[in-house]
């Protein structure tokens, strides 16, 4: 998810920046600015969104025959905070780059589908963008370099964990047996019918066999033999 969001936000901002401005995911260095402006997107923190939990239950994934082939963990949503700063030859050029970021985020409250990427789009949940702040931290701790101006961008994105396919084998048959009170009793049962065997002369239960089968669709039938 992190790499998907990195790529998507970078792609969105490149649409609005001039062709000479470079978008970087790295922190600004101490070296003097180069010929071209650089917009730095530094991932500062990740936390689960307050409303980030969808369905609380896991769901079963079935094949065409109705058999369970996996269990899907519920979707989660996380808030990723980016510190965005610009390095350029002049403060005016830096401010112009940050102004472009503001304009892009004002236009797009939600990340467009054509830049979101296949995996983010497949979740069916939006990726939201919000300029936020301020952050109570020293500029160096935020990764903005020596006192540079910066924006804080919160991106809330969905994460669909991979389906778990390592599940126990389906129960085909469960058989329970109770020992006979009379060892002379014989198993005289007929498959598919309820049948009891009793001993003489007191007619007490001598042997009971219970069989449970689990068929596709979770239709359960019990047969005693």
Image (tube, rainbow, N blue to C red):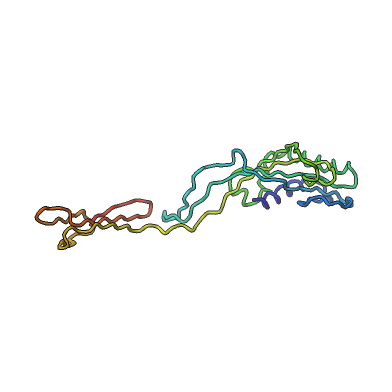
Between 112 and 28, the one nearer to me in the picture: 28
Furthest-front residue in this view: 181
- x%, y% of residue 173? 33, 58
Which quadrant of the structure image shows residue 216? bottom left
Q: How many marks?
A: 0
Viewer-nearest residue: 45 or 58: 45
Answer with the quarter of the image where residue 148 lies: top right
Which of 97 and 185 lies nearest the eye of the viewer? Answer: 185
Is 176 placed above or below 39 here? below
Quarter the C terminus occupies: bottom left
Residue 129 shown left or right of residue 205 in the figure: right
> Is 37 or 166 nearer to us in this picture?
166
Q: Residue at x 49, y 57 (%)?
A: 165
Residue 224 placement (x, y as % from top left): 24, 55
Q: Residue furthest left?
A: 201
Residue at 66% x, 43% y: name it: 79
At which x and y percent is residue 186? 16, 62
Q: Is residue 133 above or below residue 175?
A: above
Q: Position of residue 138 (x, y in %)?
A: 79, 42
């Amino acid at each position: 998810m992190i790499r998907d969001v990195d790529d998507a936000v970078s792609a969105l901002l490149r649409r609005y920046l001039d062709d000479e401005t470079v978008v970087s995911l790295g922190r600004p260095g101490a070296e003097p600015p180069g010929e071209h402006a650089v917009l730095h997107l530094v991932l500062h923190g990740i936390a689960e969104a307050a409303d980030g939990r969808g369905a609380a239950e896991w769901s079963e994934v079935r094949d065409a025959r109705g058999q369970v082939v996996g269990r899907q963990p519920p979707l989660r949503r996380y808030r990723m905070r980016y510190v965005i700063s610009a390095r350029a030859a002049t403060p005016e050029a830096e401010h112009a780059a940050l102004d472009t970021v503001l304009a892009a985020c004002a236009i797009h409250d939600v990340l467009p589908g054509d830049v979101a990427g296949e995996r983010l789009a497949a979740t069916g949940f939006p990726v939201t963008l919000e300029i936020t702040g301020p952050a109570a931290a020293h500029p160096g701790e935020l990764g903005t370099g020596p006192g540079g101006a910066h924006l804080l961008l919160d991106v809330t994105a969905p994460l669909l964990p991979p389906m778990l396919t390592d599940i126990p084998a389906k129960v085909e048959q469960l058989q329970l047996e109770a020992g006979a009170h009379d060892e002379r009793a014989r198993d005289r049962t007929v498959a598919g019918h309820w049948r009891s065997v009793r001993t003489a002369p007191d007619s007490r239960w001598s042997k009971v066999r219970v069989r449970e089968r689990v068929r596709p669709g979770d239709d359960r039938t019990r047969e005693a033999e």
